[in-house]
Image (cartoon, rainbow, N blue to C red):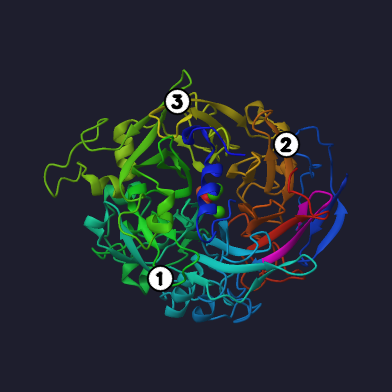
Amino acid sequence: MVSRRSRSSRPFREIVEESLQRRTFLHVAMAGTCAAVLTATGRAATGRAATGRAANVAAVQFRSVGPSLSDAVIVPDGYAAEVLYRWGDPVNGVTPQFHPDASDTAEDQARQAGMGHDGMEFFSVPGHDPNTRGLLVINHEYTDQVLLFPDGLDPLPPALMPPHKVRKSKASHGVSVVEIARQTGGDWMVVESARARRITADTPMRICGPAAAVLGASARGTVNNCATGRTPWGTCLTCEENFQGVFGTSHAGFVPTAAQRRYGLRPEGFCYTMNGSKVGAYRWWEQDQRFDLANSDNDSQRFGYVVEIDPLDPESVPVKRTALGRLKHENAELVLAADGRVVVYLGDDEADEFIYKFVSAHRWDPSAGNAAGPGAAGSLLDEGTLYVARFDADGSGRWLALVPGQNGIPVKRTPDDAAGFDAADICIRTRQAATAAGATPMDRPEWVAVHPETREVFVSLTNNRGRQTTDAANPRSGNIFGHILRWHETDHDPASQSFRWRVFVLAGNPSHPDPECHGNVSGDSFGCPDGLKFDSAGILWIQTDMSSSVVGTSGYAELGHNMMLAADPDSGEVRRFLTGPRGCEITGNTMTPDRRTMFVNIQHPGEPADDVSAPTDPGRYSSWPDGAGARPRSATIAIRRLDGGVIGS
Ligand code: FEO
Ligand code: CA
Ligand code: CA
Ligand code: CA
């Protein structure tokens, strides 16, 4: 039946699907009391969950699992989870195979899964059923510098970080593109593919958008790839988050500028604390000038962007889309405005930073297909306006344009006017422009998710222990458990300049001694929401990232390990769907188009409370997924229902 609705009132998913069907090939996949347990042996098994409640929500129809402190992945009764792609597994499914003692070389690592699996998107492959074969684009957010090597952090300073260790660490950051196929009998496997590739901290990139005028047209590498997004023209957006940690310097007397400090850039970079002393974890700058802050042409302004990747073309050069701002980017949730312009919602994950959206200057023309992607000049993602959000106490909100001369943002008067802004400065010193505009400082904005039909927007605010002054949108001081906000744009148009917002849920532990930490969750309690994504049926999937330093401790123990939950956005009811192994974060979530397989990432299993793993006893804190004292490995898992049904329903 032909829809009579106007384009502007139709859901984004419907418009995209229709346009893709018109193309010659389709390559965007829009995407009891017993529980199945994926133990530290990597095999699916069945075990008894701690609790279970019968379903009574129309959209969410599984029996929730209880909180868990076991070293396993637990999914509901009637579901099974299998390990698909672990740190060190070859991108082509064949070679080089991982060495359990982590003796793989940098060259091996550049052809294997990186560490720290995070955001992830599934794309279909031309000529194949997208429900049984496709490409996964998987972010590798960071490295555990102890587990990455057989001898951990050795040699310690003052010895330099050896070149081979810097090269391997850089090769473990970035992105994997792997082709996967479902085998007879049901299991998914990584298969040989000409499209499989690794993108690392050394991969050639293009720089596009206003900042290219300052930074040049090319760069190398993407790092600290956190969450993702996808475009209607079939590309993946990977988001650079805590890039500051791999920069530093050994030059005595170096003092970071105010602009560098705003992004956390400092001489020592990311550190571990060992025996009361700080030890630089990465120290890439000791072998690579690009990461030395004392080098005036260092690359610190060339990171912090959303990077566009064409998963179907292994020769394509990824593009840094600077018009989307330089932030500690979390994800990039792309929707279409009523008039066809592209809108991208963006969170900047740090305490008291902001929520942004980009609105393109031009409309997406579905008949142009992939012409807007990395291969083409004049991408929709290069020209437009970046806005930042102000949440007012009366439930209204404003989008403040980050434009020099508007909203209190001073215009750059001379080339060395460090306080003023031109178009490139907006894209490089984005945080400072947003502060000048009067944005609302938030409790660590993580993922933004847009409902596929209503286009209501949800954002997870993971926590902000240091918050002292509350406001309506960040209502708890010392907010240790975080919350989720929701808003409707005016006229339900993502390009609107204003919105109405409210709190969706305050996360918490009802057993916590401080009543303000109880939260108001209807259903299964959780803390520190992070990953947030709607599936095409409108179930809101929530993933948590409670710090390893607090998981299992007083005030947190009742929540168990990090988890994944399904929320009904109408009723607000929340059900726990999955619990993870020791020391992990649950993040990354994508599905086959039929919603019968869900892919989820288990990040940093075995992360100890103080971040410092044990080089001589790598399995001390977790041996998931390989078991029996093995080195823990971040991994992608595939979840299916035993009866082949739709996940969550
Ligand atoms: Fe990469 Fe803010 O999580
Ligand atoms: Ca996150
Ligand atoms: Ca987080
Ligand atoms: Ca993480």
* Residue ID at (49%, 40%): 445
**Circle 3/circle 2 CB separation < 8 Å:** no
User: Relative to residue 13, is residue 392 depicted above or below?
Assistant: above
Where does residue 381 sit, x and y in percent of width and height?
36, 50
Q: Does the beta carbon at disc 2 come under 8 Å from ligand 2? A: no
Task: Choose mark 2 or mark 1, whichever is in front.
Answer: 2
Count every numbered label the image shows and give the total: 3
Answer with left or right where residue 183 lies relative to residue 88.
right
Which element type, helix, strand or loop, lies under badge 2? Answer: loop
CA gap, disc 2 and disc 1? 42 Å
CA gap, disc 1 and disc 3? 41 Å
Identify the amino acid type marked 2: Ala
Mark 3 neighbour density, 10 Å: few (under 14) some (14–19) many (20 or more) = some
Q: Does the beta carbon at disc 3 come under 8 Å from ligand 1? A: no
Where does residue 505 sit, x and y in percent of width and height?
62, 30
Q: Which residue does the numbered mark 3 point to in the structure image?
A: 490
Q: Of all residues shown, which one is farthest toward the left?
A: 414
Sequence-wise first label, 1 or 3 = 1
Q: Which residues are magenta?
A: 72-84
Mark 2 neighbour density, 10 Å: few (under 14) some (14–19) many (20 or more) = some
Q: Which residue does the numbered mark 1 point to in the structure image?
A: 203
Which label sits on residue 59? 2
